[in-house]
Amino acid sequence: MFQKQLSTLALAAALGLGLVQPVAADALLRIGLQQEPTTLDPTSDATASIAGMLGQNVYESLTTVDESGAVLPQLAESWDVSEDGLTYTFHLAEGVTFHDGTAFDAQDVKFTFDRAMGEDSVNPAKRYFNVIEKVEVVDPQTVKMVLKQPDAFFLFNVAQGSASILAPESAEDAKTAPVGTGPFRFEGWTRGDRLKLAKNDDHRDAGEVALDRVEFRFVADPASAAAALMAGEIDAYPGFGAPEMLPQFEADPRFKVSVGSTEGEVILAMNNSKAPFTDQRVREAVNHALDRDEIIEGAMYGRAVPIGSFYPPHGAGYVDLTDRWPHDTAKAKALFEEAGIAGDTLTIRVPPFAYATRSAEIIQTELADAGIDAKVEAVEWGFWLDEVYKKQNYDMTIIAHTSPNDLGNFAKGPEYFYGYDNADYDTLWNAITVESDEAKRNALEREAQHFLADSAVMGFLFQLPKLSIVRADVTGLWGSSPVTFQPLSGVRIGSDM
């Protein structure tokens, strides 16, 4: 579990650890991360840090996304879309090779998507690919995809880490030895410590890449991360987990601090497939027990924006529903009594992220005030993935959902860890995905937000901010995260690069 705050003694030690080390001659960037992945294959695991490190760096996709969320060409230099929105013809970049020297062509694209769509696929975003009817190789530089129905998010979805293009020669080893076509090569992974990348000199845009080496260092504890930043052992920490420590860096001219946005909705998930959460009165009671202002102040030191449904406040279709279930302890208590569970014990099983553990402690007290004995159980990430995400073995949990356009999570059926199943919502989500008119799609997304809020499906808490601490002479790192990946090809160290 993360420490709640840095002790006075530890803070003094951290502040006295000296000046930032000079930039290495070979342009090494050291990035601190709180989450170490369990595998390095984004096509087989949902852990956000895989794509965060490797997406658009080691791996590439047909398309990519910039910091504004706009879709741009990547391995596909251009594409044509049929009038009915069902056929996409991608024209691929020429002269591209994988890091092991094998050539990239349309057969690799077909292999990647056939693999993702297969019956035995373990791709965490397999739903993205269910819309594809077939993939056809037209010629080595052209591939055609025929969809079963129009998909307004298709070009955006094929930019994600889950749609990374792999070669059949190396795909089976991707979990530990990733091979892609990107501007950086995988160099090594010391579990529990760091992952190394090196510049791919054979990349088609290698001349535009300023960094020679990148090291991702896994430093989950905020006190240790703060000390490492102050000592010059790491150069940047995007997604810093301790907002209470930001003032010391904001006051230090050696660093830049930013509070950006992410796609990460932080929710108190309730297992809709098991009692007592099959009873909407219980879910409403939980929502009335929640005091978002108290949670945001205590868990995020005020540096987060509240949400009332499953949609980012910066999104074009956002509607403010934070007052749908206002904080009302007496109402929550009455609903728990009406549902017959007053005094019962429920468990909040949380992963080892500061926003989750801190929020859980506050919610534990809020539920106690409403008559529920809530037990907080902090578990390791691997355990959470297996028991909560895969096996639905939980009452409540707290997690940030960092994927964009993820209202579709609630249309995944009861097998998804929410345990939520509603045919009317499935119909609504399907209407959203096929609507190509942005204004009409935004209106449907507002309807979906109301649907989820009215059903009190989850406890919607706040939008996860991106708290970043970066050395003052490092430029090009994104301040906000419209996707889970962070391209490093445009990052520079120093003014002379």
Image (spheres, rainbow, N blue to C red):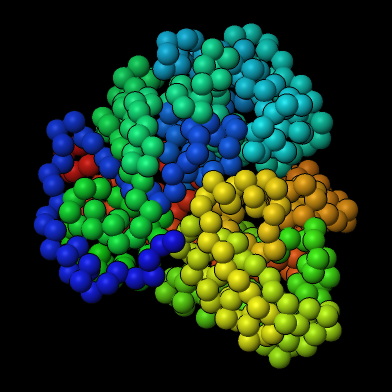
**Picture quarter containing residue 309?**
bottom right
The percent position of residue 56, horizontal first and vertical second, equals 46, 33
Residue drawn at 81 percent across, 35 percent down: 149
In the displayed structure, 18 sits above or below 372; it is above
**375 or 485: which is nearer to us?**
375
The percent position of residue 353, horizontal first and vertical second, equals 47, 59
The percent position of residue 371, horizontal first and vertical second, equals 69, 85
**295 or 475: which is nearer to us?**
295
The percent position of residue 100, horizontal first and vertical second, equals 42, 13
Q: Quadrant of the C terminus?
A: top left
Q: Quadrant of the N terminus?
A: bottom left
Residue drawn at 25 percent across, 64 percent down: 249
Image position of 456 (left or right of 220): right
In the displayed structure, 404 sits above or below 113; it is below
**168 or 276: which is nearer to us?**
276
One can see residue 92 in this view: no
Residue drawn at 38 percent across, 20 percent down: 203
| Residue at the far right in the pictured view | 423
Image position of 356 (left or right of 135): left
